[in-house]
Amino acid sequence: MTLHEDEIPVDETLVRSLLKAQRPEWADLPLSPAGAGTDNTMYRLGDDLLVRLPRTAEKAQSVRKEQEWLPRLAPFLACPIPEAVHAGTPTDVFPLTWSVHRWIDGVEAGPDTVRDWAAFGADLAAVVRELHGIDLMGATRADGLSWYRGGGLGPCDRWITGCLDDCRTTVGSELDVDSLEQLWRAALALPEPSGPHVWLHGDLKPTNLLVREGKLHAVIDFGGLSVGFPDAEHSTLWDLPPQARQAYWDTLSLDDPTWARARAWAIAVGVSGISYYWSTFPSFVAECRARLGAILTDAAAR
């Protein structure tokens, strides 16, 4: 499945060739697809390893960022996060940086895996508090750690307005895009966040939250790792049930302006995902549609 114009195709033959060249002791281990997101393709390697390959040169920058910073962040987090055991180097057949991580047992957060959504929301909030509390260790947004979700809403307005227009054409019959735009513009009118920059995961959606025995166990996929304002970190809460969302809000004592900006970020990610991936990634478009529907339902109830 190709999602980007400049994407480098990956298959098991290519992965085996990379392993034979750089980690021959792993080259004959069982290899099987382990999922693919918008940025990376993954293969499970044996019982204990995961191969992670970026789709494009731009996404490879995120792989390098993970390799550099996750070992420094991990000691400060109570929950497991990815641990790279091999930093793959570019080759003629795959000219990008790639990684091999330790496999983390767990299943994606969902209605069949989470036992208590309120407890899950509180646990997720605790992880976010830990991450945001870690010293920046001299890192700034200028150090390859600048991502749009850690900045202000204003610079994204023209882009998101275009995506809202796209959504009127594609999903306007099932979603109230005008109300979504009103929520977006109301958040734009608020003062920009003024607190200190913090470490941000950037994409705490359910597919990046692993569950064991019904509880939050690990956080994966730090490709969106950045330094910036925390508002967008809360945007994926609309992917979770209301009980989780409320418990998260209560645990972090978020104020109304932060909540409104977080919701605007959720709208931005949802409408841009539909606009960009409409013809190429239907399952991701479905995630975005569900998120926007939850935003509308939640806003109507407040």
Image: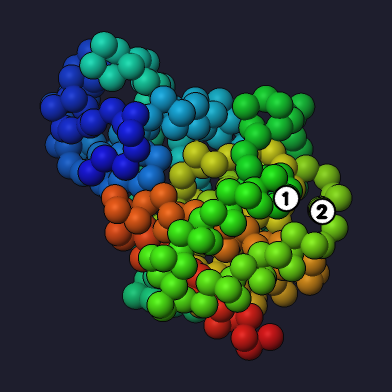
119 vs 186, nearest the viewer: 186
In the rendered image, residue 123, in percent from the top left (x then y), is placed at: 59, 65
- Quadrant of residue 72 within the rendered picture: top right
Which residue lies under the disc numbered 2? 192
SS under mark 1 = helix
94 vs 24, nearest the viewer: 94
Which residue lies under the disc numbered 1? 154
Compared to 254, does 207 lie above or below? above
In the rendered image, residue 297, in percent from the top left (x then y), is placed at: 55, 83
- Residue at 50% from the left image edge and 48% from the top image edge: 80
In the image: residue 268, left or right of residue 111: right
In the image: residue 176, left or right of residue 181: left
- Residue at 41% from the left image edge and 25% from the top image edge: 57
- Residue at 37% from the left image edge and 51% from the top image edge: 277
User: Where does the N terminus fall, quadrant-wise?
Assistant: top left
In the rendered image, residue 274, in percent from the top left (x then y), is placed at: 42, 58
Cβ–Cβ under 8 Å for marks 1 and 2: yes
Q: Is residue 169 visible?
A: yes
Q: Count neighbours of disc 2 (C-alpha within 10 A) and say few if under 14, some if 14 to 19, many if 20 or more.
A: some
Label whose residue precedes the other's in the sequence (1 or 2): 1
Compared to 272, does 301 lie above or below? below
Kind of residue sitting beneath label 1: Gly
In the image: residue 282, left or right of residue 179: left
What is the CA distance from the residue labelled 1 to the residue labelled 2? 9 Å
- Residue at 43% from the left image edge and 55% from the top image edge: 275
Kind of residue sitting beneath label 2: Glu
132 vs 212, nearest the viewer: 132
Q: Is residue 52 visible?
A: no
- Quadrant of residue 299 within the rendered picture: bottom right
- Quadrant of residue 286 within the rendered picture: bottom left
Q: Which mark is residue 98?
A: none
